[in-house]
Image: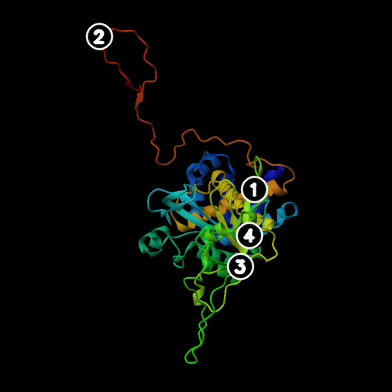
Amino acid sequence: MDARAKRFEEYVSLIAGELGHADRVQPFRGYCTGLLLPVVRKSVEPMAAYLAPHRVRSEHQRLHHFVADAPWPDEAVLGAVRSHVVGRVAHRAGVPEVLIIDDTGFPKQGVHSVGVARQYCGQLGKQDNCQVAVSVSLANEQYSVPAAYQLYLPADWAQDQARRRKAKVPQDIAFATKPAIALQLIEQAGKVAPLPGVVVADAGYGVDTAFRDRLTELGFTYVVGITGAVSLWPGGRTPLPPKPWAGHGRRPTLLRRDAQHKPLSAKALALELPARRFRTVMWREGTNAPLSSRFAALRVRCAHRDYWHAEQRPEQWLLIEWPAAEPEPTKYFLSTLPADTTMRELVRVAKLRWRIERDYQELKQELGLGHFEGRSWRGFHHHATLCIASYGFLLTERLAGPKKTLRHPLLGEIPALPGDFRPRGSPAQAAPRTGLHQNPAPRTRRRIDRAARAMPVLRTKQ
């Protein structure tokens, strides 16, 4: 056993301590090994064929039971992965400095896979039939590791008892918005170990005022994306004070607005700024050139329904990105980082969200995050947890290993499939089919008045 394989065995032994039963160690090792194989499809059946070519059926049953039915805790396994990764790589790559909240979609066919519905799918860039999962990751500029992960269950799924029973959705899972799920995941992860104090999220979460307020209540600062429609009070403008008391009845306490005294949208505020307020900031080195854009930052107060409040909301940062080649601003961020934070630091933290894109790219393309073919709630989450566990091993090998390692550090070559292996659903023997005759017809010279002879184009394979 070489040193790399020995480190993998040590990693398996460490994480397997959270599985709750010794009989689950071997399928855990096998499943993670299958995910690390450089093969195209990483669902249960192909992995079983590669891992045990001479006993595919029994290996398939063992892996399927482990991922779809065995009641081991996802939260405990993810906690062990997180602790191991951070402990091993911190001396070289630093400790995580932010929590990144995001979601990712998995295109699906049919209606039976748990949580599948017609909704926005980031992978496709449009609405389509898919599953969506919310994740919370620990990150800095060098690496990120998912710490919590949960499927978003659309309202029609949450209310359909027949589909819930068939997909084995736990009774305590009710409909919750994605921002609400993210907050639940943060609170659960915070019970396992201390979390970074800064949260980064895109506009899908940042536009939710209740989400931002709850982060503040939990003691987090944030840098979150918003849309240009969010209403704000710029510096020097505030809501009107409560109405004067008439001397009888309850004393008025609510803030006011009128037609001449009202907040501005983030976009309108950005368009009012003079050009000198924008300056170019570089946030990191890209693949071919440094990444930079034009930004402006100013102090504002959120105005969302503040007419139901007696006090103004606290000041925070509005960060505006307006690339020189664009006719209007392209991105907006709100941040509760301290008032003395520099614009460069605001931009750097806001742009840390790119790490999660790298996470999802590798988890999907290299580790088969979207390859699970089961339909149950437990199977969906177990498969994701095992993908994250395998990703954790890759991270430690790259960042804390003795030297630069391969993309897939376990196996140097792909095992051969058994000669009689046929995936489920494939015909045992292909029937003869009509194929296109690919030999081109010879070019000939003929008289225009001569009738053309029939030329056979299709032939039957013998």
The crowding category of the residue bearing disc 1, from other C-alpha atoms within 10 Å (few below 14, some 14 to 19, many at least 20), is some
Which residue lies under the disc numbered 1?
292
Q: What is the crowding at mark 3: few (fewer than 14 residues within 10 Å), some, or many (at least 20)?
A: few
Residue 80 horizontal side relative to residue 151, left or right: right
Tag 3: amino acid:
Gly
Residue under the point 63% across and 37% down: 412
Residue assigned mark 2: 450
**Residue 22 x %, y %:** 59, 57
> Which comes before the other along the chain, label 1 or label 4?
1
Mark 3–mark 4 distance (CA, rounded to whole Å): 12 Å
Residue 348 at x, y = what percent? 66, 55
Front in this rendered view, residue 211 or 270: 270
Marks 1 and 3, how far apart in space? 27 Å
Please tell me whether mark 3 sits on a helix, a strand or a loop.
loop
Of circles 1 and 3, the one toward us is: 3
Q: Are marks 3 and 4 in contact (CB under 8 Å)?
A: no
Mark number displayed over residue 357: none
Nearer to us in this view, 273 or 54: 273
Give amino acid for label 2. Answer: Arg
Instruction: Please give the residue where the numbered disc 4 appears in the rendered image.
Output: 297
Q: Nearer the viewer, residue 25 or 156?
A: 156
Going from N to C along the chain, the mark reached first, 2 or 4, is 4
Q: Earlier in the sequence, mark 1 or mark 3?
A: 3
Marked residue nearer the N-terminal end (2 or 3): 3
